[in-house]
Image: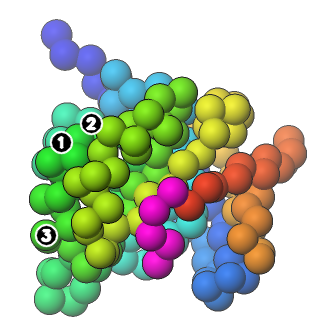
Amino acid sequence: MALKSTIYKFKLNVSDMDRPHYGEYALTVARHPSENDERMMVRVLAFALHADDDLRFGRGLSSEDEADLHAADLTGAIRLWLDVGLPDERLVRKAAARAARVVVLSYGRTAAQWWEQSKATLAKLANLTVYRLSPADSQALAGLAQRGADLQCIVQEGQIWLGDEGGMLQPALETVFGGG
């Protein structure tokens, strides 16, 4: 019998003074059985940093040909393709051909190594931005994974704060490539 996804419901309040974008989102996030809290919360952070009424979560790890998050315009054209982790460079190239903008939020102990191995190919993609989140920051985000949590994300002058009533984390994103 196949294991089912665990459903998390978050209320996310975003105050992004850099864009400027302000909104409250009711997120339903399915955590795939093979996904850990760290990866799920990096997806939530990615949503918060790109929050938009059109931004949607993909079907998850079982659909490698689909973005972790994506936003389309009224014609169905993909405006934003967002992946977290260390995606296969073939899939990133394919995403860059399909979407106006592609963002990879890499994390984990091998994120720097992944970029070094992929940059010769991926640095040719004009519509790609790659960020790196430190292992300590991504692991700290995992501590926010609670079903039914109320989360707050504040972005100001490039600084990020994400947290709940128990406290705020300040994850730092390093721009590895691009920056649009």
The residue indicated by pointer 1 is: 64
Q: How far across and how far down the image is residue 40, in percent?
A: 48, 39
Residue drawn 57% across and 66% down?
49
Magenta segment range?
176-180
Under mark 3, the amino acid is Ala
Q: Are marks 1 and 2 in contact (CB under 8 Å)?
A: yes
Q: Nearer the viewer, residue 180 or 30?
A: 180
- Can residue 119 be seen here? The reply is yes
Q: How far across and how far down the image is residue 154, in percent?
A: 74, 68
The residue indicated by pointer 2 is: 61
Asked whether, in this view, residue 21 is left or right of residue 79, the answer is right
Q: 10 Å neighbourhood of mark 1: few (<14), some, or many (≥20)? A: few
Q: Earlier in the sequence, mark 3 or mark 2?
A: 2
Tell whether position 54 is magenta: no
Q: CA distance from mark 1 to mark 2?
A: 6 Å
Under mark 1, the amino acid is Glu
The residue indicated by pointer 3 is: 97
Q: How far across and how far down the image is residue 93, in percent?
A: 17, 58
Element on which disc 1 rests: loop
Q: Main secondary structure of the magenta part?
A: loop
Q: CA distance from mark 1 to mark 3?
A: 16 Å
In this view, which residue lies farthest toward the front?
120
Element on which disc 3 rests: helix
